[in-house]
Image: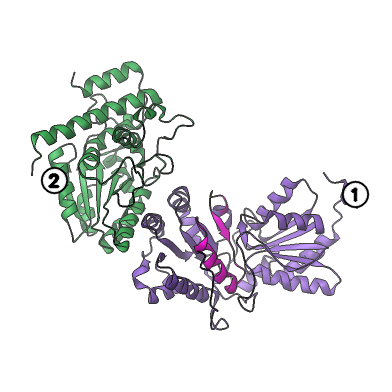
Chain colours: A purple, B green
Amino acid sequence: MPIGITWTVDDADTMTANEIYGEVLTRLGDENPRILAMTADLAGSTKIGKFQKKHPERFFNFGIAETNMMGFASGMCEAGFIPVVSTFAAFAALRCAEHVRTDVAYNRRNVKIIATHSGTSFGPAGTTHHCTEDLAVMRAIATMTVIVPADAYETAKATAAVIDHDGPCYVRIGRSFEPPLWKDLNFDWEIGKAITLREGTDITVIACGPSVLHAVEAADRAERQGLKVRVLDMHTIKPIDRDAVMAAVMDTRRIVTAEDHNIVGGLGSAVAEVVAESGKGCVLRKLGVADVFSPHGAPEDLQHLHKIDADGIEETIAEVMKMDFEQDEDWEDEV
Amino acid sequence: MPLSAEEHKRLADKAKHIRERIVEVTERSGGGHLGGSLSQTDFLVAIYYKYAKVDPKNPRWEDRDRIVLSKGHGGLGHATILGDLGFFPDPELDKFNKTGSKFGMHLDRMKVPGVDASTGSLAHGFAIGLGMAMGAKLAGKDWHTYIVLSDGECQEGTIWEGVMAGAMFKLTNCTCIVDRNRMSLDGPTEEIMALDPLDKKFEAFGWRTIVIDGHDLNQVCDALEAARAETEKPVMIVANTVKGKGVDFMEDQPKWHYGGLDSEMAARALASLRGK
């Protein structure tokens, strides 16, 4: 019996994404006594501490010991629970990589990992607290579902959806000061199904996380220049929505991806695999952290540096539109 | 309390049989983790044949006791016991390690009936097992969790995270036993990364420790019963054992951590186990 969200998130204007995630998880916990919440001394930072206040008996703080926490989460599934584990993405996905692979995924345990402070969202903290590798790692783990909500509302939808989903899930959210994409919860959101935010036939921007809002802004600016830009909110990185990618290939022949992650192994790579395997011609440009360690700085400055803000995406759209990537313009002669 | 002569003989005979099967399966499979499988046999036999609530005909029985081999390389010895108990037809063990069989050298819980956690990478099973115990406690289930560790895996940092958590969460509904055979793959633990005084380390972390001769069935059973009766602290039984126990040319030899046996060596090993 799916739980879904049968209520509205109050005070969304004043709550950050992580606070909304904490609030949603707490409400889901009201309805489902199988849900457990776990963290490693980051109850406050990840906002999973909201659950603790309401359901202290189902909340567990493991101290600064993440790998043990993943093992415990796996074991607690044996008694029928659905553990939700929250810590920073760098620790959840990198420090715990083998524990997520072996204890959770290989053991077929129904653990949900909600990783916060992903990408460069904890910008000033520097590389140790950035995480621009987690999508690559989690995507390579068999059975894992990998989700990057665009904002707080999508985080609420994703949290409910992963509880309903039978199998391990990795949801990566930011530090939670990102501006919202949506105004409320009145939209359809389904694991594995991209959302078309702008229709267009000239070029497609496929984005995830905070880059989605910037992609919409860039598309609106390009539209004023006469371009029709399709924007896809690719919130599920695995399984990737192949149909949406292939529709973009066939309809627009130009794709720009944007993600707060290394351009190696994340959304851009997932899209590239679909395009390459299709045998259909398409220009693809990947925006993200260009296989470097990002410097520290304010998140908005870093997004500008990595060209995943509206300016960077707009500039890239213009570049890609100028590319002459075929000798002829006959799209019918493709493989 | 000492076991009755009859009970002692029953368990000792079973342990002898399991050791013989470990040798036979290794000969057929081309290789196996002999050293650790032979050192863990006596206490694992006591757990499975005297105490554990398990049902070979219903391997996923909800109220069964959970048994996690955190030292997943003991899978050869573990599978041998499960086969003997009838969790699967015993002759299937002839396919141990073989392509397409249900048995890799580290057992997969999705493939081998009776296995509660897929282990192999060290220190993982300890946290998984403790999580099972905590899950049972929270859900009000009265099944017990047994966790078997190697001593070498106590060099992993994750073990000590779990030791802290076990004490913090007062997990008295599990029994942990470390197979202290003092050898890891490269040699003696004390020469590679010293563990002694291992018992005092667990005690310092808030556990009750019971140190025993892991091959003395009376001591093994006394310790397992004491652990079940403990209500204040989690219990770690430090079972002093001999790697390769029972096969004269394997005992205390790190090179027999993993090895193959041709028919002549297997015959020598069986003769040694049979006291000939």
Task: Check residue A153 for magenta coloring.
Answer: yes
SS at mark 1 in the image = loop
**Chain for disc number 1:** A
| Residue shown at the point (46%, 58%) measured from the top left | A111
Specify start and end residues of the magenta stretch as a single range. Answer: A139-167
The C terminus of chain A, quarter of image: top right
- Residue A74 lies in what quarter of the image? bottom left
Q: Nearer the viewer, residue A176 or A125?
A: A176
Give how far across and how far down residue B206 sits, in percent.
22, 60
Q: Dot 1, crowdedness within 10 Å: few (<14), some or many (≥20)?
A: few
Give the alpha-carbon distance from disc 2 to disc 1, as whole Å: 83 Å
Q: Which mark is residue B222?
A: 2
Q: Which mark is residue A327?
A: 1
Q: Is residue B202 left or right of residue A322?
A: left
Type of residue at label 1? Answer: Gln
Give how far across and how far down residue B147 sits, in percent.
29, 48
